[in-house]
Amino acid sequence: MNTRAILAIARKDLKVAVQNNGVVLPIIILPLILFVVVPWIMVYASFLAEATGTSTNMGQLLERMPAGLLHELSGYTPDQQLIAFTLIYMLAPMFLIMPLMVSSVLAADSFAGEKERKTLEALLYTPTTDRELFTAKLLGSWTAAVVVALLSFIVYAINANVAGWQSIGHLFFPNWMWIALVLWVTPAVAGLGLVVMVFASARAQGFQDAYQTGGLVVLPVILLMVGQISGVMYFSLGVVMIVGLVIWLIDAVLLWFASKSFRRGELMTKF
């Protein structure tokens, strides 16, 4: 493989993406909301529920949770359980939105955005094979999505511990489930966002069209969140490992189909 050419194309895509406000702003705003603002809102809501006497309703919510989750929360007091549940478990599915969103935005700009910028012709003359060009177009977006997710995790870990310190009094985040979520599931989810966007971009007229179509990939994450809140399941270490394995298998199948259908000669008509 022509590694230098692949890295050059990946760097070029990232450089162009950074200069696009439509790409950069969502990547900045979403982590700030999810991992800086939301933890404090959750903790404040817990304190408010305790002060107003509505914490009983929240306690009833926890009682509907699976026995495994209640066992993991058994080391906390009732007030601490609510904070630990929201910051450790309830927000875990929301974290997966981060790599999905970043990879989707960057991939939409990398593929469909080429058509808007009228830079497709230059790609056709790069000294790379179809497979190398396909790899280069995915590499930059995937790497950026994983890096942004890791940085978001660090910010969230600090913020969650600071926000919950007054009630819990010690470092409680992350646990092994979150370690597996970040190291095992996050790269797979970023890859899923990429391959879905490749197929969406093939039928899109531009960046916005591709991004809106590919945005449907967040629906499974929303279903996981609803399932956990309703008590149907919870993000245990085992569940996270299985979810990651399933997503990696889906990635492998979709990447195989996408790479087989990717032909540089068809770029002018597809993207």
Image: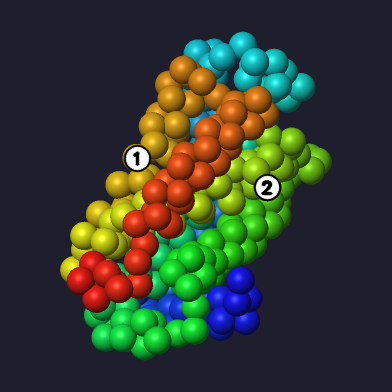
Compared to residue 150, the image places residue 5 above or below, namely below
Q: Earlier in the sequence, mark 1 or mark 2?
A: 2
- The residue depicted at 29 percent of the width and 62 percent of the height is 201
Do we see residue 53 in this rendering?
no
Alpha carbon distance from label 1 to label 2: 22 Å
In the displayed structure image, the side of residue 20 where residue 248 appears, left or right? right
Question: Could you say which is closer to the camera, residue 54 or residue 174?
Answer: 174
Question: Could you say which is closer to the camera, residue 31 or residue 108?
Answer: 108
Identify the image quadrant of the N terminus.
Answer: bottom right
Q: Secondary structure at mark 2?
A: helix
- The residue depicted at 42 percent of the width and 46 percent of the height is 254
Q: Amino acid at mark 1?
A: Leu
Do we see residue 67 in this rendering?
yes
Q: Secondary structure at mark 1?
A: helix
Q: Which residue is mark 2?
A: 183
- The residue depicted at 39 percent of the width and 82 percent of the height is 123
Q: Amino acid at mark 2?
A: Leu
How far across and down, in percent of the image, does residue 72 sit? 70, 21
How far across and down, in percent of the image, does residue 230 sit? 43, 21
How far across and down, in percent of the image, does residue 135 sit? 51, 66
Q: Which residue is mark 1?
A: 219
Question: Could you say which is closer to the camera, residue 103 or residue 133?
Answer: 133
Q: How many marks?
A: 2
